[in-house]
Image (tube, rainbow, N blue to C red):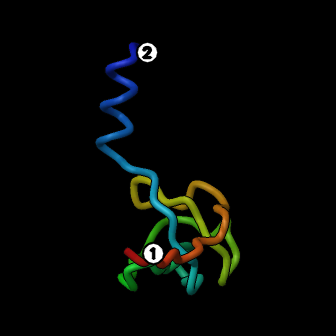
Amino acid sequence: MRLWEEFEQLSADPLLVAQVIAHNADGTSTVQFPNSSTLKVMGQGVGVGDFAFIRGGEIRGEAPPVVPVTLEV
């Protein structure tokens, strides 16, 4: 794959991090993003309470916890 095609693929479908808040009976999970929005995604490979990488509406694996940062200017 050429470099530009790789870049386009990354920009078209970003890798997100969210916390798994529920596993649903249909094989999906509900995740919550740092801005408090929620989304139902495919997969249950990450435990409830843990953080997951999300791409294309699907859990792609476990992610490190998101640590909020406060900066004073």
Q: Nearer the viewer, residue 71 or 58?
A: 71
Classify 72 as above or below 4.
below
Which residue lies most toward the front here?
A: 73
Q: Which residue is at 32% across, 20% downward?
A: 4
Residue ranking furthest to the top: 2
Q: Quadrant of residue 40?
A: bottom left
47 vs 54: above or below: below
Percent x, y of residue 29: 53, 76
* Crowd rating for badge 2 (residues with CA inside 10 Å; few <14, some 14–19, many 20+): few
Q: Give me the disc on residue 1.
A: 2
Asked if disc 1 and disc 2 are in contact, CB closer than 8 Å, the reply is no
Counting from the top left corner in percent of width and height, residue 18 is at: 51, 71
Q: Is residue 20 left or right of residue 7?
A: right
Q: In this view, does 21 lie above or below 14?
A: below
How packed mark 1 is, by other alpha carbons closer than 10 Å (few <14, some 14-19, many 20 or more), is: few
Which image quarter holds the N terminus? Answer: top left
**x 37%, y 80%: residue:** 35
Is label 1 or label 2 in front? 1
Give the residue drawn at x 67%, y 64%. 64
Residue at 57% in and 78% down: 20
Give the side of residue 35 with respect to residue 60, left or right: left
Nearer the observer, 37 or 41 = 37
Residue kind at label 2, given as amino acid type: Met
Q: In which quarter of the image is the C terminus?
A: bottom left
Nearer-the-camera pick, 30 or 6: 6
Q: Position of residue 65 (x, y in %)?
A: 64, 71
Badge 1 marks a residue whose secondary structure is: loop
**What type is the residue that disc 1 sits on?**
Leu
Q: Distance between the residues labelled 1 and 2?
A: 40 Å
